[in-house]
Image: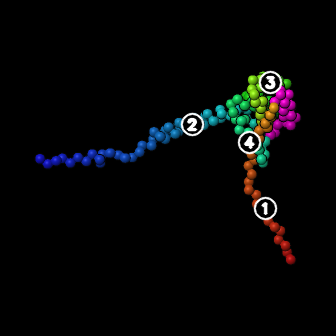
Amino acid sequence: MPLALRNEGAKISSDINVTPMVDVMLVLLIIFMVVTPMLQHGVSVDLAKVNSPEQMPDADKEDALLVSVTRDGQVYFGSDQISVDNLTNKVKDRLANKPDKRVYVKADMRARFGGVVQVVDAVRAAGVDDLGLLTEQRKTTPTTPPAPAASGQ
C-alpha cells in the first residue's frame, strides 16, 4: 500500500488582503475631515501676520476666554455675539471663579483700530491681569541679497 502524498502547503495563500484596512482608513479620514473644523475655538477671523509672534498655547484650551473682533466690527465672546457695552460684565462673570485672569483677543487684520481698542478697554475694565493679542507667523520667503553693482572702470 503506497502512502498518499498530500501537499496542503500549496493551497495556502500568503497574500495580505488590504481592502479592509483601506476601508477603515477612508472612514477615519472622513471623520477627521468633518471633526477638524469643529475644533476651532470661537469665531474665524484673519489674524494679523507678524515676524516674531509670542507663543500662547493656553489660548487653545477649552476653558480659555476668547474675545473676537471681526472685519465688520462685530464682537464675539467665545462664539456668542455681544455688544462692547456688555462685554465688561460678561468677562467679570466668567473670571469670578477663575484664579488665572487671562483673556485672549483675536482681531481681524482689517478690523478698525478704534473697535479693537474699545474691546481691549472693556476687557481691562473687567479686571483682567493678562491680555493676549493673538497673531499668526508671517510666511517669509527667502530673499536673496541684492547683487553688488558692477563697477565699469
**Mark 4 crowd level (few <14, some 14–19, many ≥20, 10 Å Cα):** few
Which label lies toward us, 1 or 4?
4
Secondary structure at badge 3 equals helix
User: Which residues fall within the magenta stretch?
Assistant: 109-128
The residue at which mark 2 appears reads as 30
Tell which tag, 3 or 2, sits nearer the viewer: 3
In the structure shown, which secondary structural element does the residue marked by tag 1 occupy? loop
The circle drawn on residue 55 is: 4
Image position, residue 38 (x, y; %): 65, 32
Q: Earlier in the sequence, mark 3 or mark 4?
A: 4
**Within the image, what quadrant is residue 77 found in?**
top right
Q: Which numbered disc, 2 or 1, marks the residue that appears first in the sequence?
A: 2
How far from the left and from the top, in percent, is residue 28? Answer: 54, 37
Q: Which mark is residue 92?
A: 3
The Cα–Cα distance between marks 4 and 2, rounded to whole angstroms, is: 31 Å
In the rendered image, which quarter is residue 55 located in?
top right
Q: Residue furthest right?
A: 114
Is residue 39 shown in magenta? no
Q: Which residue is mark 1?
A: 145
Q: In the displayed structure, would residue 151 be above or below residue 133?
A: below
Evaluate whether residue 108 shows in this view.
Answer: no
**Amino acid at pointer 3:** Lys
Does label 1 or label 3 sit earlier along the sequence? 3
